[in-house]
Amino acid sequence: MVELDKSISFDGRDIRLKVGLLAPQAGGSVLIESGDTAVLVTATRSQGREGIDFLPLLVDYEERLYAAGRIPGGFLRREGRPPEKVTLTSRLIDRPLRPLFPQWLRDDIQIVATTLSLDEQVPPDVLAVTGASIAVCIAGIPFNGPMAAVRVGLVGDDFIINPTYKEIEMGDLDLIVAGSPEGVIMVEAGANQLPEQDIIEAIDFGYEAVRDLIAAQQELMAEMGIQLVEETPPEVDPTLENFIRDRATESIKGVLSKYEQDKSARDASLDEIKASLTEAIAQLPEEDAIRVAAAENSKALGNTFKALTKQLMRRQIIEEGIRVDGRKLDEVRPVSCRVGILPSRVHGTGLFNRGLTQVLSACTLGTPGDAQDLGDDLNPEDTKRYLHHYNFPPFSVGETKPMRAPGRREIGHGALAERAIVPVLPPKETFPYVLRVVSEVLSSNGSTSMGSVCGSTLALMDAGVPISKPVSGAAMGLIKEGSEVRILTDIQGIEDFLGDMDFKVAGTDTGITALQMDMKINGLSMDVIAQAIEQARPARLHILEKMLAAIDKPRTELSPFAPRLLTIKIDQELIGLVIGPGGKTIKSITEETGAKIDIEDDGTITVSAIDGEKAKRAISIIQGMTRKLNEGDVYVGRVTRLIPIGAFVEVLPGKEGMIHISQLADYRVGKVEDEVAVGDEVIVKVREIDGKGRINLTRLGIHPDQAAAARSAAAT
């Protein structure tokens, strides 16, 4: 392939495309660059496997630490298990790409995006999304693209396309918009309680830039003489489909119109209809075309039945405006909330129910040392203070399957809930705890990620975390048939499964904190997106009202089993003194008090213990060690040990000085033991601090007023 370079510029920032330079044996490849960030994206297609009835698309995002001039940690000194950010970026590429492949395609397709260089200014994720579209087009894979993505930031009152890491951190918005020529196809956002109208304007602003990137891809394809592939779908014999449609349509309609049925009853009724079809086909002669078609493809009956159910459910919503559970299009399922349902050893709990969806969230308060280390990925953030984990066990949908490590879906839902709640967390300076919330999905019938947001807000408030405002969330759906569009509030499982959109909106009564929109169609107009965002607001506020009825503000008292944190700040030069050689000093303080001690590079020391008195004792020791003594200061001390030439006295916690035998009394002392014993309380004055920092004490020349002041200070 001939090498070709192309540059796209908007808002003073360039994106450079290099084709034909790297990975010549991949189906399609592109090196996409901005600043010093460079991502290689490849797309490869293999012949489909027998029995596959879905699109086997595999998207992998890879980070190499050499991209930032770093060597991996650990024994092996090479990249290992992908960090969470890598998994989330893989999902980010997959979500706008997947719906643009033809539904009939069954070939294996793999997209690999590898960050080869990172300037720690330009995030590589949106570059990888756009690069995936280019690689697929070059590979000649059937694709309803091109597709592109941009990031939108908000600094002050100005929207910025593809902001730097610093601009994202400074701003109130981190929004990713992906789109096709048909419209917006994916939205991912975290926001600092922005009004709905601001979010709508930001999405529109981003899609304008997306259109520029799509046009640039079309120009690139024209220069290379590449046209988008339009393969003919495989022919499908309609015999079996017509049989199922004739036999099952009225029965399925009857089930979908029984609005009083719950999910399990409806599923059981549909299973009965499908079983009757299987029995009817089995009674046909072996040579019958319908029986032959069902035998040749064991999944044909199930897939056709599902497609018919989808069509009938969608038609009912479009024509009658009524959903399968009898709700109106903008109606929320019944909501109930509870807090504190687990014993106080769990620092805070929230139970959120919406219809048949139930999420139990548990909050744990940790110490600064519990923060997650993000050292082995390319994210410039070093640590993470708020951790949100989401678990989806198989019993939540009445199934059985092996329990494995969290998958991409679990990681993605946890990250979405985390993004929704971070804007309302108290600052580290006023609430230094590390926070972990785990959301256990105990029952699922749609919108568990938003249930996780609601349950976790309840858990944080129950734990006494002083969040600025409670956060609620709702998932919006879409049914689009031709020009007819219906937006659904609070979608349940069947509406998500058979619908065209899953649009999750979370926020406070002030504004939006997180968005995530995924499509199953080729794109959506801004008018429909704006309508969905606006329709989500009353649903969020309704849910929020139910949450506040359970707990209207954060508790003022922490669980008795939560650690008590005390924080002081010392000179950075004294950090080594507190730690001691080989950590000896800090270890001794921990052993003596039972408290945990965390020291930051700026000299901030956080001491934690379940018993607050233990934390106070440790703080007292550290303050004593780091307090600067001056010659002439008078203290009440305790004799700690004796030597032939004098006695050692602890004048402050962890800080000792020596009284020479000649300074024990105003007369000649024969033996140190004649004057003092270990454990004695003595009044001493700092006589001298020598060049090595050694403290020399005396009992001589102390005025009675000084002694009285020292006793008073020791008593407090």
Image: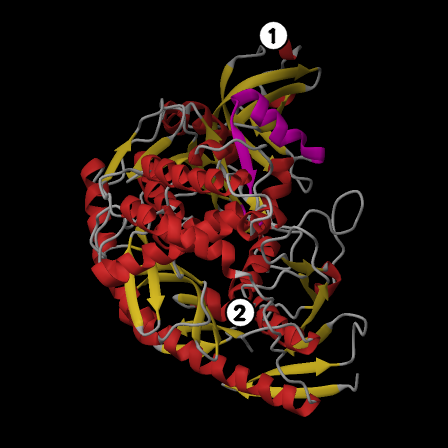
Q: Position of residue 435 (x, y in %)?
A: 44, 41
The residue that label 2 is drawn on is: 100
Residue at the (68%, 78%) spot, across then down: 138
Q: Position of residue 465 (x, y in %)?
A: 34, 40
| Colour scheme of the picture | secondary structure
Quarter occupied by the C terminus: top left
Classify residue 501 as left or right of residue 680. left
Q: Residue furthest top?
A: 674
Residue 667 position (above or below residue 278): above
Q: Which residues are magenta?
A: 581-603
Amino acid under label 1?
A: Asp
Residue at the (53%, 82%) spot, across then down: 214
Q: Dot 2: what SS?
A: helix
The residue that label 1 is drawn on is: 674
Between label 2 and label 1, give the one nearer the viewer: 2
Residue 685 position (above or below residue 97): above
Q: Is residue 422 in sight in this rendering?
A: no
Classify residue 280 as left or right of residue 118. left
Instruction: Indicate which disc residue 432 carries.
Output: none
Q: Dot 1: what SS?
A: helix
Q: Could you say which is closer to the camera, residue 470 or residue 649? A: 470
